[in-house]
Image (tube, rainbow, N blue to C red):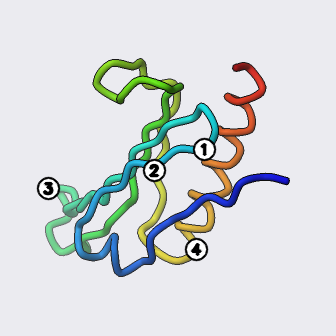
Amino acid sequence: MSEHMEMPTLLFWENGNVWYGSKGNTRFFIQPVKHSPPEDQPEGEVYYTLDVEVWPGPLTKALSQITATNSFPRTLEGMDQMVRWLEEQAEKDNKQA
């Protein structure tokens, strides 16, 4: 049986919090990022993403090499996509360990 990946709610990300987590030997860091409109489109809307970095454990991020990165919309749908992607990364990484 696979271990459930715990993830904060959308409100956690809307408040600008960051998250470190792991599944098996896979470690990850998630950070909400605010994106301004391009300079040539100042009337454009600000948008937010959840940016993810993945590395193999057991060491900390600072002592490891990032092996995968991705960015997802800061929405409920984006969170679902992010969890699926993290699950895929963990499955792949943990098979290699």
Q: Is residue 54 left or right of residue 24?
A: left
Residue 19 point in image, percent of width and height: 36, 55
Dot 3 corresponds to which residue?
39
Q: Circle 2 sits on which residue?
A: 71
Q: Secondary structure at mark 2?
A: strand
For the residues bearing labels 4 and 1, Cβ distance under 8 angstroms? no
Q: Quadrant of the C terminus?
A: top right
Nearer to us: label 3 or label 4: 4
Distance Cα–Cα, label 3 vs label 4 = 28 Å
Q: Amino acid at mark 4?
A: Glu
Instruction: Report if the CB atoms under discs 3 and 4 are less than 8 Å apart.
Output: no
Among numbered discs 2 and 4, the one appearing first in the sequence: 2
Left or right: 77 in relation to 13: right
Check disc 4 and report the residue beneath it. 77
Q: Are marks 3 and 2 in contact (CB under 8 Å)?
A: no
Q: CA distance from mark 4 to mark 1?
A: 21 Å
Residue labelled with disc 1: 23
For the residues labelled 1 and 2, the Cα–Cα distance comes to 19 Å
Of the residues under marks 1 and 2, which one precedes in the sequence? Answer: 1
Label 2 amino acid? Ser
Circle on res. 54: none
Marks 3 and 2, Cα distance to the nearest angstrom? 21 Å
Query: Disc 3 or 4, which lies upstream in sequence?
Result: 3
Q: CA distance from mark 2 to mark 4?
A: 13 Å
